[in-house]
Image: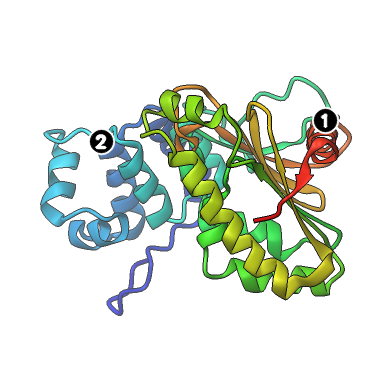
Amino acid sequence: MWTDGGAAIALAPDFWTTSQTIDALAKRDIPQFFRLVQRETGVTQTRLGVAVGLSQAQVSEVMSGSRRVSSVDVLARIAEGLAMPVAARSALFMGSRVPVGGVAVADHDTGSEVTAVYAARGLVSRPSWNDVVIHANRHLWLYGMAELGYALDDDVPDLVERAAQRGCDIRVLLLDPEYSGAVDVDADEGSPPGTLATRTRAALARYRQMQDAAGPAMQIRVFSAPPTVSVVRGDDHMIVTPYLRFFVGGNSPTMELRRATGKMFDRYVKHVQRTWDDAKEWTP
């Protein structure tokens, strides 16, 4: 329940697995979903609005049907503001009606290693990203075009330094800012020429500062090849974003993997390792 002191809206775990909740989320029937939240908690429209980043008037319009919620940004605020668990997020963003305790994704083999899926990389919460780093004891890999989001996160330098102290093999592998194909990526994403190179140089400068603190446990390399995927790895936990042409990275579908009996995780490890072997050490 929402308390008068302003605490977050606390929804019982069972709320998220009912057929009514899952069906409303899968249909993106936000008016019905808000009604279910109110029925469960007794929360007012004002309190609900505060939680999800909407005004009371906007919540009223949504619930009356006069305002339609379709923006990914608004859906993401609803998911974050109500601490929506992974299975419920999957229903909301992937349209799945399977009310399971984990992620509602198709499991076509008994070794499936996908534990979460997101319609867009931007929907992955910052705590989820940092959780990969916090629990890494052997391998910490950051591989992608710029990985500027990690580079600019105020918590990451300390997390990386601690990972180095734990004996992690820390690898940062980014697109070479001098790579000629970077201008093609800018064109595909609708960005001014030089945008990606500038972002990558900024990220490399930040990672160099982290390297100074982390010491020899951290290495930085750059690759010169068409970028295909972003991989953030912490031991047997991985967040993977395949790059899609004509979409910025934040809008590309993303998945979390946990190494199990399947081969998907190891295939990404092999891909990163091969790219790492072919890359060169970054020298400003």
Tell me the element at label 1. helix
Any part of residue 143 in sight: no
The kind of residue tagged 1 is Arg
Choose between 144 and 252: the one closer to the eye: 144
The number of numbered discs placed on residues in the rendered structure image is 2
Q: Residue at x 35, y 50 (%)?
A: 77
Residue 226, position as x, y percentages in the image: 64, 26
206 on left or right of 115: left
Of the numbered discs 1 and 2, the one sitting upstream in the chain is 2
- According to the image, label 2 marks what residue? 69
- According to the image, label 1 marks what residue? 267
Residue 66, position as x, y percentages in the image: 11, 34
Residue 115, position as x, y percentages in the image: 68, 40
Determine which of the numbered discs, if any, sits on residue 136 in the image. none
228 on left or right of 126: right
Vertical order, 133 against 111 (above or below): below
Which quadrant, please, contains the C terminus? Answer: bottom right
Residue 164 found in image quarter: bottom right
The kind of residue tagged 2 is Val
Choose between 169 and 62: the one closer to the eye: 169
Residue 15, position as x, y percentages in the image: 47, 49
Tell me the element at label 2. loop
183 on left or right of 177: left
Q: Residue at x 78, y 37 (%)?
A: 272
Q: Residue at x 30, y 35 (%)?
A: 71
